Image (spheres, rainbow, N blue to C red):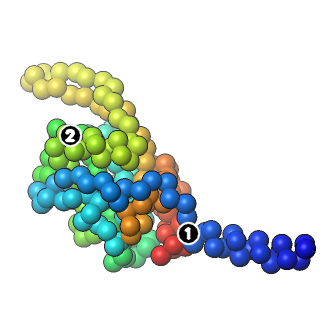
């Protein structure tokens, strides 16, 4: 019996590693958004048939959003710019993060091919955030000398991976330095 258990256990571990548990199924969801070029995007429908590595950011973030964006870029590079994986960053600050703002943000990180930045109507953006279990809350508001409102947002630190059927199969702390190598390893197991 012990011999049989030793033979079955490695097979079970290997089989489970190739078929990760589904954390959430976003396949029935539909969010009408805009990309950095002001092109209409239906998320996740427009990405079905590909893996999606997705982070959540806002361009006025003073700290972790740039780390999340750098991690997304590193994952893309380490995977050697794969054709079967889309890289997406969605903002939770649609008021300030217009398509042109996101386009400039993408340029500042040297991101063009294979990256989609999403924004849109606040209702749609916040519905996406709720569906992805991303939380955000204005943490500090102040007024500038010229009368503009300046605010910062406390938010979730997250990168997630969707499979080709728009099911969330992996979630990570998005700004951690070790995340790119873990995401690459996990994706290589399931691709």
Give the alpha-carbon distance from disc 1 to disc 2, as whole Å: 34 Å
User: Mark 1 near mark 2, Cβ–Cβ under 8 Å?
Assistant: no
**Which residue occupies 49% across, 48% down?**
173
Q: Position of residue 9 (x, y in %)?
A: 76, 71
Q: Is residue 77 among the parts visible in the rendering?
A: yes
| Of residues 14 and 157, the one drawn nearer to the viewer in this rendering | 14
Give percent across and percent down for residue 41: 19, 59
Instruction: In the rendered structure, find residue 30 and report the number of the disc placed on it.
Output: none
Residue 111 in view (yes/no): no
Above or below — where is 127 with respect to 109? above
* Residue 52: percent from left, percent from top: 37, 64
Badge 1 or badge 2: first in the primary sequence? 1
Q: In this view, does 96 lie above or below 177?
A: above
* Quarter containing the N terminus: bottom right
- Label 1: few (<14), some or many (≥20) within 10 Å? few
Query: Pointer 2: what residue?
Result: 123
Q: What element carries label 1?
A: loop
Q: Residue 19 carries which label?
A: 1
Give the vertical position of 97 relative to 21 (above or below). above
Q: Residue 125: name its quadrant.
A: top left
Toward the viewer: 26 or 119?
26
Element under disc 2: helix
Q: Where is residue 141 in the image (x, y as percent from the top left)?
A: 25, 23
């Amino acid at each position: 019996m012990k011999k049989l258990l030793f033979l079955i256990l490695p097979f079970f571990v290997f089989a489970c590693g190739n078929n990760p548990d589904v954390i959430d199924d976003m396949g029935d969801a539909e969010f009408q958004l805009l990309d950095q070029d002001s092109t209409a995007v239906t998320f996740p429908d427009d990405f079905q048939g590909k893996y999606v590595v997705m982070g959540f950011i806002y361009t006025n973030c003073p700290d972790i959003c740039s780390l999340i964006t750098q991690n997304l870029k590193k994952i893309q590079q380490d995977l050697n710019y794969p054709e079967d994986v889309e890289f997406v960053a969605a903002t939770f600050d649609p008021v300030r993060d217009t398509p042109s703002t996101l386009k400039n943000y993408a340029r500042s990180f040297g991101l063009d091919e294979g990256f989609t930045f999403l924004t849109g109507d606040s209702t749609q953006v916040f519905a996406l955030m709720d569906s992805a279990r991303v939380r955000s809350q204005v943490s500090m508001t102040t007024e500038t000398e010229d009368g503009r409102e300046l605010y910062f947002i406390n938010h979730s630190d997250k990168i997630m991976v969707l499979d080709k059927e728009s099911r969330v199969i992996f979630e990570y702390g998005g700004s951690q330095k070790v995340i790119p190598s873990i995401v690459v390893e996990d994706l290589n197991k399931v691709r």
